[in-house]
Image: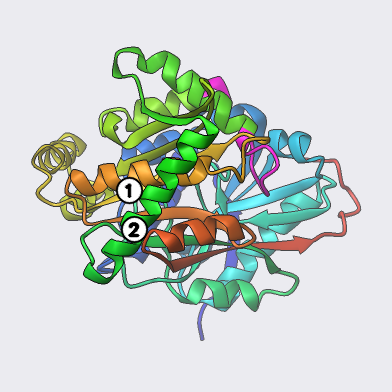
Amino acid sequence: MAEPVSVRLVESKADYETFLKFPWAIYKGNPYWVPPLLSMQKHKLDREHNATWKHMEGDYFIAWRGDKPVGTIAAFINHRHNEFHNEHIGFFGMFEVYDDQEAATALLDTAADWVARRGYDAIRGPASFSTNDECGVLIEGFEDPPVVLMPYNYPYYARLIDETPGFEKVMDLFSYYITLEGIEDAKERLDKLFRITRKNNERRSITVRPIDRSNLAQEFILLRNIYNKAWERNWGFVPASDEELDELVKALGQYFDPRLAFFAEVQGTPVAFILALPDMNQPLHRAYARPGKPEPITLLQVLWHWKLRSKINRIRIMLMGVQEGYRGIGVEAAMFAEMYQAAARMGWHYADGGWVLETNTAMERLVDAHNGRPYKRYRFYQRDLTPAPNSGQA
């Protein structure tokens, strides 16, 4: 008979190391999982130095069978999310577990109880630790490595959450596969689409310009301001703080390609942007940053592939935003056409466009017009809570 599952708070240094490195154990031998750099993972979990934790509180937990770890989870409150959306909820994230219903239920119940004891109305997730980072459970599209900053998990994860009482779907997200290589039967249609877009740009005074390489600091501030305005009504969105943006720029800066970033202006006023990144997960997947392997060696391998483009054939269209009042007049199509043509000229084979809310039918139509199709689906779950009797106490 298997030993019973116990879930314990991460308290010691040994606990922390177990929590940090558990994914390497569970995905060992998996051909699709892309291991994160340990330095980035440590920073994400660092509640003193990660800027996101300045507006969060939370704890980490490990599920054990005897002396063997069988799963992990984080429970947390994102105060910035609650203030922005006028909600009163908590979250779970960093959810990794073997195909073990008892362990999964114990972890999810522990996180839900942690949130309920603080008097909150529901728990939602997974998110690690906001919609600006990896979020959602992958439920379709398992036989393909994830693109940069997107999650991956085994197919059984959704079943384990579905079979834990109280958890139900609250929102799905899509990623789109967009072909950039020449397709004979689509070339005529795309050429016509680009001609229509150019005529609309002239009629409505829409211009699309590349990011100013000589003034990147100010350009990223402009991007952040448009992003926060454009996404403020999006489900689950939390505005990025100055510190969070600085951290993101620092983390991705060495891989950023200014040829894949554009602003759209209407009558000279910047109102929208689109940003893509080379998929650095492809060389990272090959370099395989494992615990114990010197990270500088991994980074050198990744940078070598990046410089030679020897192992990268796709980009991720990571961010796109149009300020309210300028939507539906062709700004989205103008930027998308510019990105599509620039990426194709640069020799990229295809793009991942995501994530996109399942309710965003306008984006679905735009991507479909540019040789795109949904190929991955992610899911957010939620459980309504009855606050525990000692709610409000830690």
| Helix, strand or loop status at disc 2 | helix
Where is residue 368? Give x, y as percent. Answer: 45, 63
Which label was assigned to residue 88?
Answer: none
Report the side of 147 relative to 288 (left or right).
right
Q: Is residue 231 magenta?
A: yes
Give the prevailing secondary structure in the magenta stretch: loop
The residue sitting at 87% across, 54% down in the picture is: 387
Question: Which numbered mark, 1 or 2, is in the foreground of this view?
Answer: 2
What's the residue type where badge 2 is placed?
Leu
Which label was assigned to residue 190?
Answer: 2
| Helix, strand or loop status at disc 1 | helix
The residue sitting at 45% across, 75% down in the picture is: 155
- Find the magenta span and give its range: 230-243
Where is residue 189? Give x, y as percent. Answer: 35, 63
Label 1 or label 2, whichever comes before in sequence order: 2
Q: Which residue is mark 1?
A: 340
Neighbour tally class for label 1: few under 14, some 14-19, many 20 plus, Cα within 10 Å: many
Neighbour tally class for label 2: few under 14, some 14-19, many 20 plus, Cα within 10 Å: some
The residue sitting at 26% across, 34% down in the picture is: 255
Task: Answer with the quarter of the image where residue 321 lies.
Answer: top right
Task: Answer with the quarter of the image where residue 216 lies.
Answer: top left
Task: Measure the C-alpha gap from mark 1 to mark 2.
Answer: 10 Å
